[in-house]
Image (tube, coloured by chain):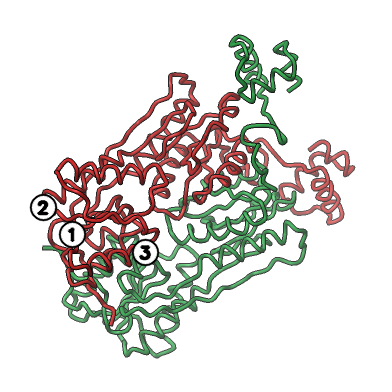
Chain colours: A red, B green
Amino acid sequence: MRDVAAAASVSVKTVSRVVHNYPFIRDEVRSRVQAEIRRLGFRPNGNAVGLRQTGRPAGSIGVLAADLADPFYAGMVSAIEQVSTARSFTTLVASSGEDAERERTLLATFVERRLDGLIVVSADRRHDHLRPDLDVGTHIVFADRPPQRLPVDCVLAAHADGARQAVEHLLGQGHRAIAFVGHSPAIHTARQRLRGFRAALTAAGLAPHTVRTDALDTEAAHRATAELLAAEDAPTALFADNPRLVGGMATAIAESAAPRTALVAFDDSELAGVLGVTVVAQDPRALGTQAADLLFSRLDGDHSRPRRIILPTTLVPRGSGEGRGVALRATRS
Amino acid sequence: MRDVAAAASVSVKTVSRVVHNYPFIRDEVRSRVQAEIRRLGFRPNGNAVGLRQTGRPAGSIGVLAADLADPFYAGMVSAIEQVSTARSFTTLVASSGEDAERERTLLATFVERRLDGLIVVSADRRHDHLRPDLDVGTHIVFADRPPQRLPVDCVLAAHADGARQAVEHLLGQGHRAIAFVGHSPAIHTARQRLRGFRAALTAAGLAPHTVRTDALDTEAAHRATAELLAAEDAPTALFADNPRLVGGMATAIAESAAPRTALVAFDDSELAGVLGVTVVAQDPRALGTQAADLLFSRLDGDHSRPRRIILPTTLVPRGSGEGRGVALRATRS
């Protein structure tokens, strides 16, 4: 502030008044001070003015999510924010859009902006490029997907176990012709779910009715389901690999000749709740809370060996997996 | 790097090798260099190592949204990211959770972390505290909700017009007993929608059947709808003030004695699509794109007067507003 005062040939008090937007300052003086503020890139700091009249955060953490439009990550981020806010930290979020290169650029931005710690849902297959950042004291916790060749904490859900739970539930209802609808398992978590699906059937001495890995979105899942149910030897039960497929699959079931076809989906959603779709649910808030707790324990000075926390999934029966079908009727004319 | 080398009594080359994780460095030397790196807070920079092996962003913009778990803001943010990524900028996002104090802290964090520009969905009633930041060259664009006493660009949707559009559509279908279900209009946009709802009925010489402003979430909307439809003089049509109420309202309609009660909701959602709910939709992606375009034009040096862009809404008829009811059947036993 002193530099600005000197450059504008006014008192520090006058600079302060301009910055605080006091009235009764001559326009000419105000303009001169503002010009010097801009020229010198002066930023009022400390407990001075403007934004800083309010509580200063103790620090900031960064969260890199795969996709902010996915309610799962939105729930995870919200839980992280809650922990972080309770510690008077702010939370800045970015999304990679499942693009590994963009992920690296965003992580670089977080490091450059000197965030105190990072929680990462990684779309990348390698993470050793983060080692230098660990070495200089950046704390990183992986969530939802495990780190590769990087000694950091992580919190994961039991994806294989969850898929197994879904299949065992359907087997318990008497189903033997169970089909998988999902997408190509390039991502760790999707691979785990398909593995659990197969393992549960194998354990029961069965093979999958069908494994469709071409359902990238709800429209593709609608098509895949319609094709499966139109076949002579149609499955009696379907496993939806992720909640984004539920709308298309439920609609296809409602429109089919077999509207009581069973459906169990991995992960919960508002749509699944309204449509009465049975799900095996991860707890995105627990994932976020645990990841944030780990990160803050590291920021608090915990130097113990990296931990890996696996969270269980929960079966939520709502009717679609118990013989009542989906609560949707076809409206197409 | 030179400081680290001097402090650890090794060559710059050795520091570089430690930072790059080269093998064949004695553990003792590696530890000494790492200790100095930590002590001096050294960060490899420029086109050196680690995260920076990949493309450096040209800069970063910050987005403050009211609620990241709301798909509307997720869509807006995704469109902003697209514009920003095309300009080689990264996008950092934070959410206020509709808390004005948290909003101020987050904006302070954005400014402190020296982001180049901000797009703000504000939960605050006053924004003059941002003036000092404008004065020192921070570019700010408001989205979704207008700025108060702050000369900055903003992009808004035509909320009053949208609600009017919904009511006129229902009037056109012959409805005269139309009820509003929403929440207390403390927020600018909600006030505008209620205003448009009333204005359209007044223009037709009618009064609202009921205005319920106690539907804060989908459960409350379920209760409010069930009560409305159980009354002797039930409305024949309902206007849902926001997409978060659609699940509860559609379920209550399906469970009621009048499952053909008309429903038109403000804003689109996946749920509305699957349930066949007619909506008046804003375009969250257009909102994000326009806000980002405005911000980048300012970053490019456009000093013209602040602009206010109003985006129109679109009516999407799907059956629930045209006599076919919602595509949901009651499953409660």
- The residue located at (31%, 52%) in the rendering is A241
Marks 1 and 3 on same chain: yes
Q: Which corner quadrant holds the N terminus of chain B?
A: top right
Which circle's residue, 1 or 3, is located before the other in the chain? 3
Distance in Å between CA atoms under marks 2 and 3: 27 Å
Going from N to C along the chain, the mark reached first, 1 or 2, is 2
| Residues flagged by tags 1 and 2 on a common chain | yes
Callout 3: SS: helix
Q: Which mark is residue A173?
A: 2
Q: Secondary structure at mark 1?
A: strand
Q: Quadrant of residue B50?
A: top right
- Give the alpha-carbon distance from disc 1 to disc 2, as whole Å: 9 Å
Amino acid type assigned to the residue bearing label 1 in the image: Ala
Which residue was labeled with disc 1? A262
Give the camera-side residue of A64 and B65: A64
Q: Alpha-carbon distance for marks 1 and 3?
A: 19 Å
The amino acid marked with disc number 2 is: Gln
Q: Residue at x 76, y 46 (%)?
A: A17
Where is mark 3, residue-wise? Answer: A220
